[in-house]
Image (cartoon, rainbow, N blue to C red):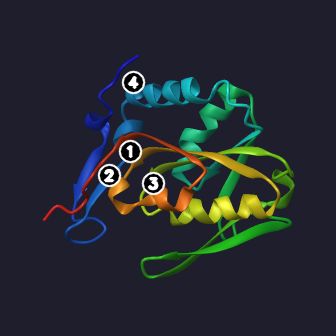
């Protein structure tokens, strides 16, 4: 199956601030053929990977990771914003443009020796995913692959992920619209 994924991505100028072009995946979700294309590509990429779990970053990573995990017969590990998970948790803070944020995973969802595929919708600077990688590593699991539907390689995210396979379906090379 082939699909012009770029045509499904909504490009919103001046969001979240003037001069930034926002790449919105809801256009993919509004076109069943685009969404199906993404999931089929993911299944093709990872069907023989040997992963033991699929970790999905809140919230848009859930949308793409859940159908993949179902197709591969793998458990889904939720990487959530702080305060959303009960019980014993791992947590990791990371820097945002203006401040910090925290992500969490339930300790019972990570096993030592797990081989993890980490999924999000868009990979920009990689701060959230980098925090997730460190959290899994500290728990004794290994994130060997990262998948995002959209990548912004001009923000140098690959520098953070040496030794990890990073795959994006579509890359945009300049988000500045001015």
Circle nearer the viewer, 2 or 3: 3
> SS class of the residue under badge 3?
strand
Query: Which residue is nearer to you in this view: 117 or 101?
Result: 117
- x 31%, y 42%: residue: 9
- x 21%, y 71%: residue: 18
Circle nearer the viewer, 4 or 2: 2
> SS class of the residue under badge 4?
helix
Q: Which of the numbered marks, if any, corresponds to residue 134?
A: none
Query: What x and y, as percent, mark residue 92?
Result: 68, 71
Query: What x and y, as percent, mark residue 105?
Result: 74, 60
Query: Which residue is nearer to you in this view: 100 or 162?
Result: 162
Of the image marks 4 and 1, the number of the one nearer the N terminus:
1
Query: What x and y, as percent, mark residue 27?
Result: 34, 40
Q: CA distance from mark 3 to mark 1?
A: 16 Å
Identify whether 12 is placed above or below 94: above
- Find disc 2 in the rendering and name its residue: 23
Identify whether 88 is placed above or below 58: below
Circle nearer the viewer, 3 or 1: 3
Of the image marks 2 and 3, the number of the one nearer the N terminus:
2
- Find disc 4 in the rendering and name its residue: 33
Q: CA distance from mark 4 to mark 1?
A: 13 Å
Of the image marks 4 and 2, the number of the one nearer the N terminus:
2
> SS class of the residue under badge 2?
strand
Of the image marks 3 and 4, the number of the one nearer the N terminus:
4
- x 58%, y 56%: residue: 58
Asked if labels 2 and 4 touch by Cβ distance under 8 angstroms, the answer is no
Of the image marks 3 and 1, the number of the one nearer the N terminus:
1
Farthest residue to the top: give it.
1
Farthest residue to the front: give it.
163
Q: Which of the numbered marks, if any, corresponds to residue 123?
A: 3
């Amino acid at each position: 199956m082939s699909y012009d994924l770029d045509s499904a991505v909504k490009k919103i100028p001046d969001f979240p601030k003037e001069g930034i072009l926002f790449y919105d995946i809801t256009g993919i979700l509004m076109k069943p053929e685009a969404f199906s294309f993404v999931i089929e590509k993911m299944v093709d990429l990872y069907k023989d990977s040997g992963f033991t779990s699929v970790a999905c970053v809140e919230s848009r990573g859930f949308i793409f990771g859940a159908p993949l995990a179902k197709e591969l017969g793998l458990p889904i590990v939720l990487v959530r914003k702080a305060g959303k998970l009960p019980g014993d948790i791992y947590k990791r803070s990371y820097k945002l443009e203006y401040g910090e944020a925290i992500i969490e995973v339930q300790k019972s969802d990570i096993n030592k020796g797990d081989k993890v595929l980490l999924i999000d919708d868009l990979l920009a600077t990689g701060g959230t995913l980098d925090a997730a990688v460190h959290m899994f590593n500290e728990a004794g699991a290994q994130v060997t692959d990262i998948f995002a539907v959209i990548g912004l390689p001009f923000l140098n995210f690959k520098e953070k992920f040496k030794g990890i396979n990073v795959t994006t379906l579509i890359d945009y090379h300049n988000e500045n619209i001015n």
